[in-house]
Image (spheres, rainbow, N blue to C red):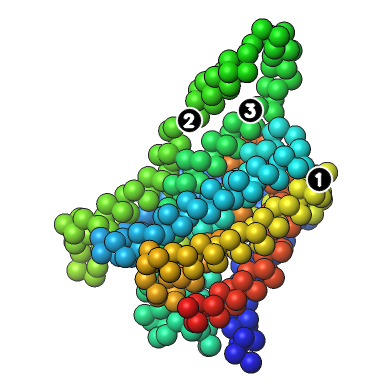
Amino acid sequence: MELMQLFVTASIPVLKVLLITALGLYLALDRVNILGEVTRKNLNTVVFYVFGPALVGSNVAQTITYQSMVNMWFMPVNILITFVIGSMLGWLLIQLTRPPAHLRGLVLGCCAAGNLGMMLLVIVPAVCIEKGSPFGASDVCHMYAMGYASLSMAIGAVYLWSYVYNIVRISSRRGTQDSNQSSEMSSTSDQATTSGQLKQRIVMVLKTINLKTIFAPASIGALVGFAIGVIPQIRKLLIGDGAPLRVIQDTAHLLGDGAIPALTLIIGGNLLQGLRGSGIQKSLLVGIIVVRYVALPLIGILVVKGALKFGLVHSDPLYLFVLLLQFSLPPAMNIGVMTQLFGAGENECSVIMMWTYASASLSLTFWSAAFMWLVARL
């Protein structure tokens, strides 16, 4: 009975996401045409430059302090582990399925980057207020949940826009350049040594990596939020009812509130393309689902239990729950924003998102309940 109650508690936040996604799908229908392709692209741009940075910055500034950063030092490491292991599994999947060149970055990104922002901000605080939550008083749980989710969102944004963004960008360009480069490579292949080809490949990658994306709007929002949160003098000016410049924080928070529903509506609208299909390999879809919902969560249990055993994390059930949940999330929605920005793999991304988020309704509920049961016994 206890496990069933945990399952019901875990299902409510996931259903909220599904309802908003369904609304986005409806608004994108041709007969409704409120959230058409052009509108989604424009809304994507607004989210990228305005809503996203405001959401990351305002939540980080409000909930992160120097002491909380010290207590949560392992979370950035944990997120890095999810990206590294996800990338390794994604590379293995690419070797097995051999997708087209312009989709390899998309596949790698979907395996590496989970939805560390919106999903955690919706699920974790919502779990706190549900009956049967194992995390204690709802108000205290909610406060800490926002801090954990905000840090996860900020770190995830930095990793996403500095790593996955470049992978998707390079892959989209490579898809259009491969045909031109193939004749040039064949004419020089007899003369080039293996080491020479390796050096040429490294130089090509270094030239194409855009280091400016480390300072993408969401990353800048995270850095600003950290500065406000951990520097007491700045924090007193902006955070709190008596802060003289609190209107700035309130405005940023107001803008940030639009990011989650906007992103969820966009993903719902993009699912319409997924329903129409794009000819993507079924083995590729199955592989991504297995990576994100089977392999990564199981590996995550080993990582978090190992970190707890060696004293790298404190035994706070809510903190451990968030660390575990970071391994079981669906692909980051902003990957869809990236494919639209570069105009490569949009339809395939829609199909991937449709099936992974449809599967998430079951997998997230299952893993959330399993993780709540597990952390209560660690």
Q: The residue under label 3 is which amino acid type?
A: Arg
Q: Secondary structure at mark 1?
A: loop
User: Which one is in front, 216 or 243?
Assistant: 216
Q: Residues within 10 Å of mark 2 (few under 14, many from 20)?
A: some
Q: CA distance from mark 1 to mark 3?
A: 21 Å
User: Where is residue 324 drawn, in percent x and y?
Assistant: 52, 66
N-terminal-most mark, 1 or 3? 3
The residue to which callout 2 is attached is 210
Task: Check disc 2 and give the amino acid type.
Answer: Asn
Mark 3 and mark 2: Cα distance apart in space: 13 Å
Q: As displayed, is residue 247 above or below residue 363?
A: above
Q: Residue at x 24, y 68 (%)?
A: 240
Drawn side of residue 342 relative to residue 76, left or right: right
Residue ID for mark 3: 173
Measuring 73% from the left and 12% from the top, which residue is drawn there?
186
Image check: 20 left or right of 84? right
Against 372, residue 166 (above or below) is above
Across and down, in percent, residue 303 comes to: 51, 62
In which quadrant will I find the N terminus?
Answer: bottom right
Task: Residue at the far front: name it.
Answer: 310
Which structural element holds mark 2?
loop
The residue labelled by disc 1 is 281
Picture disc at residue 204: none
- Which of the two residues, 277 or 92, is positioned nearer the viewer here? 92
- Mark 3 and mark 2 lie on one chain; the one further toward the N terminus is 3
Q: Locate residue 237: give its quadrant.
A: bottom left
Q: Is residue 328 above or below residue 286?
A: below
**Tag 1: residue type?**
Gln
Asked which quadrant contains residue 143, the reply is: bottom left
Residue at image point 43% right, 33% down: 212
**Mark 1 or mark 2: whose residue is earlier in sequence:** 2
